[in-house]
Image (spheres, rainbow, N blue to C red):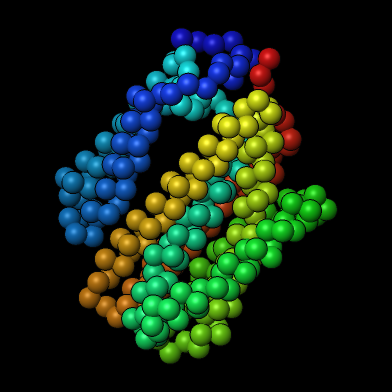
Amino acid sequence: MNRPRREWLRWSAAPDPVGSALLVAGVGALLYGIIEGPSSGWASVRVIGGLLLSAALLALFTARSLRAERPLLDPRVFRVRRLRAGALGVGVAFFGLFSLFYVNAQYLQYAKGYSPLVAGCAIVPLAVGMMVASRHSIRLAARFGDGVVAAGLAGIVAGLVLMSFATASTPYVLYALCLVVLSLGMGLCVPVLSAAVMSSLPQDRAGLGSGLNGATREIGSALGVAVMGTSLSSHGSEVFSAAMSFGFRVVAGLVLAGSLVALAWWRGGGARKVPVG
C-alpha cells in the first residue's frame, strides 16, 4: 500500500509481530554467520547461508514495512539525514563499547591476574569518563557544532586503537587512560546523536525515536560482542593479549568506517524534521 508522502507517520503505533519476527530473525542470522566464521570457515555453507538468509530476511522486513498499515518501523524515516546519522552513530559507538566489555574482564583477570572484585573496580574510569562528558555534551554541541560529534567518535576509535597495544605487562594506569579516552568519546557523541534522532521526529512520535535509539544500541552491542568474539576465536592458539590486540584493531577499523559514513550524513543533514502532515 502506497501512502501519501506527508502522511506516513500519522498512524498510531500498534504491535507488528510479523515485522518484529523478521527483524529479530534477520539480525540473528547475521550474528550466527559472524560467530560461525572461525569454527566453520568463512566459505562454509553455514556462514554463507547465514549471511544470505540475514540479507533476505532484512530485505523482506524492509519491503513489508514499506507496505504495512502500521509497521514496526517505517524505513522512510531514514530519509532524514540527521536521523540516520544519529542512528548509525549510536550503533557504531555501542559496537565499540561492547567489544571492550566482552574482553575487559578476561584481560584483567587472565592477563593481569586480578581477582573478579578488583577487575570490576578497575573498569570504574570508563563510567566516570562517560558521566563527566555526557553532562556537558549537548551544551558543547550547541556552542561548537558538529565538531563535538566528530571528536566523540574519534575518541572511541582512538581508545580502541590504544587498547590494542595492551599486554600483560602494561601498567594499569596506562590501561585506565585508554578507558578514559574511549569513555570521553562515548560521553561526547552519544547524547548528541541520540538527541538528533529524537529531534528529527515530531513530538507525538517520541516513542518511535526512543525505540529506534534503543534498537540501534542493542544491535550495535550484539554485533560488537560477535565481532570481538569471532576475532578472538580466530586467534585462539595465540597468547590472549595478542588475540585481543587483533580484535581491537578489527573493531577500531569498523568503527572508523561507520563513523565516517555517519559524519558524512550528519554534516549534510541540517535540522529538517520528518514530514508528518
- Can residue 80 be seen here? The reply is no
**In percent of the image, x 33 and y 81: which residue is there?**
110
Q: Relative to 36, is 247 above or below?
A: below
- Tell me: residue 11, above or below residue 214: above
Q: Quadrant of the C terminus?
A: top right
- Camera-nearest residue between 129 and 259: 129
Which residue, as the protein is rendered here, is positioned at the far right? Answer: 143
Where residue 251 sits, quadrant-wise, is bottom left
Residue 92 left/right relative to 26: right
Q: Which percent across, then down, holds residue 113?
A: 37, 86
In-front residue for pair 178/214: 214
Q: Position of residue 237 (x, y in %)?
A: 22, 75
In this rendering, position of residue 35 left or right of residue 83: left
- Residue drawn 42% across and 72% down? 104
* Picture mark count: 0
- Of residues 93 and 250, the one nearer the viewer is 93
User: Residue 275: which quarter of the image?
Assistant: top right
Res 205 quadrant in image: top right
Q: Is residue 129 left or right of residue 237?
A: right
Question: Could you tell me which residue is drawn at 58 percent across and 67 percent down?
Answer: 127
Residue 135, position in %: x, y? 72, 58
Question: What residue is rendered at 30% in x and 80% in y?
Answer: 239
Residue 90 located left or right of residue 113: right
Q: Position of residue 4 (x, y in %)?
A: 59, 10
Residue 219 in sight in this render = yes
